[in-house]
Image (cartoon, rainbow, N blue to C red):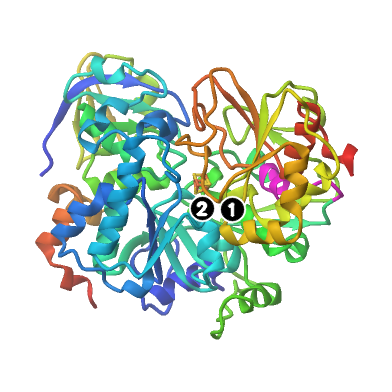
């Protein structure tokens, strides 16, 4: 019987010839990372109790992205504490104000096929887009791994999610993700490895694949992985100059279940408040009044997303009663937007373009939502109270749908503007 | 052996995510006050209503969403001593093991327990006694490896006792 890519990576990481679903293993970690909200402020003492020494400073990164720039003194104090802690324990890879960690990790070359990537954030699954085993943990586990370089893992069963066809105009990777989540459900892949495959995925850009892996956790998945291919290698070659391992699922690997989707007749989709799997087509919900939109975050703030939104907003003005917040997913993306003239398009259309950060996504700062406020967002979660008041409402959609909705001040089908 | 836990049941539904268990805007609270955030996304006064030893009883996929360990920590600091649910989101489950915070998976218990029933839990055996209704439910037992971690009070005391070097094979 063949093995899945997830099983192969975990076998290597635990120095075994093979592993099977259900096995409890100790795996070596290739990259460990954390950020200020759940990082040293929570685990510094536990880490100290274990000797306070980072097992390998080359393999640990810390990000200040969630509370930046601080809007309250409490947040500012956490940021300061994190900076000081990082200095005191000799953190080598330190990223402040560079953008949400999941994007920056990719740009800095930490994410590579075959690696075990562990982070204190549920969207760590993002790294699976480049063929890594990437999964989230909490703070105490992080203290443990930071001192030992190891993590206990239970080898997951794998789901193979096959996509045929090609995406019609106006339909993006975000819509692909929402279709899967709507079908499989918010808890439908809990504890499992999701493997995305098929011609549609092969033809998808790396930016698009990243959205799928990012949102795998919205189905409860342990990881959301895509077999690396020539496209992955080309993409990685632009940022790292090291040999890239090629690791692939075997043809006869064992999957607990296979799903089949076709992109040919996919429409722009929207997840309604307050659940990621509450998915409808845009035609079913068009016309719902909104207060504003958000294009950005580690899900919908990559260059491709910005280009798509700018395409709709070019030479137009957003609706006078609507706001539009645009947050690039990294400083590098911000720079590229500046160079390529996208900043101009957004500004002239009446959008606010902020620095690269998590922004209001997790409800910390910079554009929190008021009571009963309604927003269409390219982010990954629309839980009650996620981005502010518990009576606010978030509709999840692609950057294209967000941009079109900003023009009309209501949920709008982007295909009308293409 | 883990101590027995005795307290009142507080019932919640399916898909209770960590934004409800510990809302983002309250995460800035100092860690020693994080108990005030417990379940605040559903009931901001929850922490004032419960007594030490009380037990959360919830449906499917408890603790989904963000990896924030502040969620189980908030419950623990508020005085909750165990959780019984149909199943947990995986990071939440991990966090509870790491913290030595007892959680049990049990379908039957969820369907039968009524809010404020008096419960007594034996975590290592996965046994839930409903004193009010005079019933007993059997949840899943933990693998031996996890029981060791629970017995030590979490993964940090566990590895301290065992020695970090024992992990190097
Ligand atoms: S952008 Fe949102 S989802 Fe992404 S890491 Fe930041 S808070 Fe989490």
Q: Position of residue A10 (x, y in %)?
A: 43, 70
Residue A132 located left or right of residue A46: right
Q: In which quarter of the view is residue A326 placed? A: top right
Magenta region, residue range: A168-179
Q: Do the residues at pointers 2 and 1 share their chain?
A: yes
Residue A196 in view here: no
Sort mark 1 into few (<14), some (14-19) or many (20+) by Cα contacts within 10 Å: many
* Residues at marks 2 and 1, CA–CA distance in whole angstroms: 6 Å
* Residue at mark 2: C-beta within 8 A of ligand 1: yes
- Magenta segment includes B39: no
* Residue where numbered disc 1 is placed: A329
Q: Quadrant of the N terminus of chain A?
A: bottom right
Task: State the residue in front, B4 or A54.
Answer: A54
* Residue at mark 1: C-beta within 8 A of ligand 1: yes
Q: Verify CB contact (< 8 Å) between mark 2 and mark 1.
A: yes
Residue B59 vertical placement versus B51 (above, below): below
Residue A290 image label = none
* Residue where numbered disc 2 is placed: A100
Residue B88 vertical placement versus B58 (above, below): below
């Amino acid at each position: 019987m063949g093995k899945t890519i997830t099983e192969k990576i975990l076998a290597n990481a635990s120095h075994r010839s093979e592993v099977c679903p259900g096995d409890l293993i100790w795996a070596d970690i290739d990259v460990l990372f954390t950020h200020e909200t759940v990082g040293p402020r929570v685990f510094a003492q536990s880490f100290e109790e274990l000797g306070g020494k980072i097992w390998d400073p080359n393999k640990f990164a810390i990000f200040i992205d969630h509370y930046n720039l601080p809007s309250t003194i409490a947040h500012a104090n956490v940021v300061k504490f994190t900076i000081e802690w990082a200095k005191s324990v000799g953190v080598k890879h330190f990223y402040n104000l560079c953008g949400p960690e999941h994007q920056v990790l990719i740009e800095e070359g930490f994410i590579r096929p075959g690696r075990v990537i562990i982070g204190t954030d549920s969207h760590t699954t993002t790294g699976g887009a480049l063929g890594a085993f990437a999964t989230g943990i909490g703070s105490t586990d992080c203290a443990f791994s930071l001192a030992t370089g190891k993590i206990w893992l239970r080898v997951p069963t794998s789901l193979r999610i096959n996509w045929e066809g090609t995406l019609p105009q106006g339909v993006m990777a975000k819509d692909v993700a929402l279709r899967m989540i709507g079908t499989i459900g918010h808890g439908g892949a809990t504890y499992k490895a999701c493997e995305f495959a098929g011609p549609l995925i092969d033809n998808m850009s790396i930016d698009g694949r990243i959205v799928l892996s990012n949102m795998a956790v919205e189905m409860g998945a342990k990881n959301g992985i895509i077999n690396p291919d020539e496209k992955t290698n080309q993409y990685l070659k632009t940022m790292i100059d090291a040999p890239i391992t090629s690791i692939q699922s075997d043809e006869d690997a064992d999957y607990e279940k296979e799903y089949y989707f076709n992109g040919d007749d996919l429409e722009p989709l929207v997840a309604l408040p307050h659940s990621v799997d509450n998915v409808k087509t845009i035609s079913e919900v068009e016309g719902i009044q909104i207060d504003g939109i958000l294009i950005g975050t580690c899900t919908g703030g990559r260059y491709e997303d910005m280009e798509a939104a700018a395409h709709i907003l070019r030479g137009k003005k957003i609706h006078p009663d609507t706001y539009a917040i645009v947050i690039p997913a990294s400083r590098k993306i911000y720079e590229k937007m500046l160079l390529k003239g996208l900043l101009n398009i957004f500004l002239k259309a009446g959008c606010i373009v902020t620095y690269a950060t998590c922004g209001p996504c997790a409800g910390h700062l910079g554009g929190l939502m008021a009571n009963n406020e309604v927003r269409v967002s390219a982010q990954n979660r629309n839980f009650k109270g996620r981005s502010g008041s518990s009576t606010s409402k978030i509709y999840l959609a692609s950057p294209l749908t967000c941009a079109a909705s900003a023009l009309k001040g209501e949920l709008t089908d982007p295909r009308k503007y293409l | 052996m883990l101590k027995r836990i005795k307290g009142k049941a507080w019932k919640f539904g399916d898909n209770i995510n960590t934004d409800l268990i510990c809302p983002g805007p309250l995460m800035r609270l100092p860690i020693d006050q994080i108990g005030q955030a417990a379940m605040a996304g559903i009931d901001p006064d929850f922490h004032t209503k419960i007594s030490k030893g009380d037990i959360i009883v919830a449906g499917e996929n408890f603790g989904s969403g963000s990896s924030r360990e502040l969620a189980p920590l908030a419950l623990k600091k508020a005085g909750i001593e165990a959780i019984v649910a149909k199943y947990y989101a995986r990071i939440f489950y991990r966090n509870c093991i790491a913290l030595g915070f007892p959680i049990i998976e049990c379908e039957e218990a969820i369907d039968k327990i009524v809010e404020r029933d008096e419960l007594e839990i034996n975590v290592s055996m996965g046994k839930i006694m409903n004193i009010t209704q005079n019933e007993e439910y059997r949840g899943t037992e933990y693998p031996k490896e996890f029981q060791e971690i629970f017995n030590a009070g979490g993964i940090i005391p566990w590895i301290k006792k065992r020695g970090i070097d024992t992990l190097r094979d």
